[in-house]
Image (tube, helix red, strand yellow):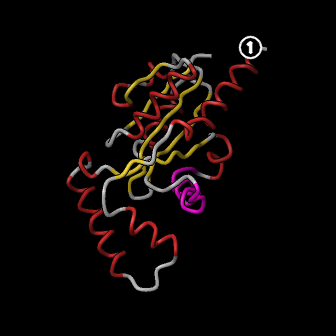
Amino acid sequence: MKILVTYKSKTEFTKRYAEIIAKEVDGYLMDFNEVTIERMSEFDVVVYGGGIYAGMVNGLKKAKEMFEESSAKKMIVFATGGAPNAAVNETDDIWAHNLSVEESESIPHFYMQGGICYEKMSFVNRTFMKMMSKALSKKKNKDSAEEGFSQAITSSYDISSEEYAQPLIRYLLEGQRRKEK
């Protein structure tokens, strides 16, 4: 089973996870900016990763379009963001905004906590995050999730770990074993 692991990464968290996944499953690693439909068609499985910006997985719409036009058989998606893996409600909302009900059932999808890196963000993204931070800090009667988010986005941090890629890696390895039988 030939696996393409491709990604769009602005702050390096997604790239780091893509590198881990490709290494563990003996996949071919490629920046999404270099991927073509023809190249994607050379693989059985396409693993696409993107960071979350304003609730959207960076580049996912284009990746899904290219996958549909390719002859690859399966697509798997992972997203990285600043929320902890335990923030299930937030990640469920992200998937609901990025995958239709049908896609959610047919495309395996995984979330991996990464962090925030203001130093590598574009001016627009940095400004947006700072505005959100300021607005949240002024809000009265925040719930616990809002309070945690408000504190988390005040500065750069890295909460990524190889362990958060393991569910996706196990999924791929189990698929390889089933195919070999």
Image coordinates of residue 144 in percent, x first then y, are: 52, 74
Q: Of 138 and 68, which appears nearest the observer?
A: 138
- Please give the name of the residue rendered at 67% of the width and 32% of the height, measured from the top-left corner: 171
The stretch drawn in magenta includes residue 105: no
Side (left or right) of 126 relative to 101: left
Image coordinates of residue 135 in percent, x first then y, are: 32, 76
Can you say whether 98 is above or below 63 in the image? below
Q: Quadrant of the C terminus?
A: top right
Query: The magenta stretch spans which residues?
Result: 86-99
Q: Of 79 and 112, which appears nearest the observer?
A: 112
Image coordinates of residue 35 in percent, x first then y, are: 39, 25
Image coordinates of residue 154 in percent, x first then y, are: 32, 64
- Please give the name of the residue rendered at 48% of the width and 56% of the height, measured from the top-left corner: 83
Our reading of the magenta stretch's main secondary structure is helix
- Please give the name of the residue rendered at 27% of the width and 52% of the height, measured from the top-left corner: 118
- Please give the name of the residue rendered at 27% of the width and 69% of the height, measured from the top-left corner: 131
Please give the count of numbered marks on the rendered protein.
1
Name the residue that disc number 1 marks. 180
Crowd band around label 1 with a 10 angstrom C-alpha radius: few (<14), some (14–19), many (20+): few
* Residue lying furthest right: 181
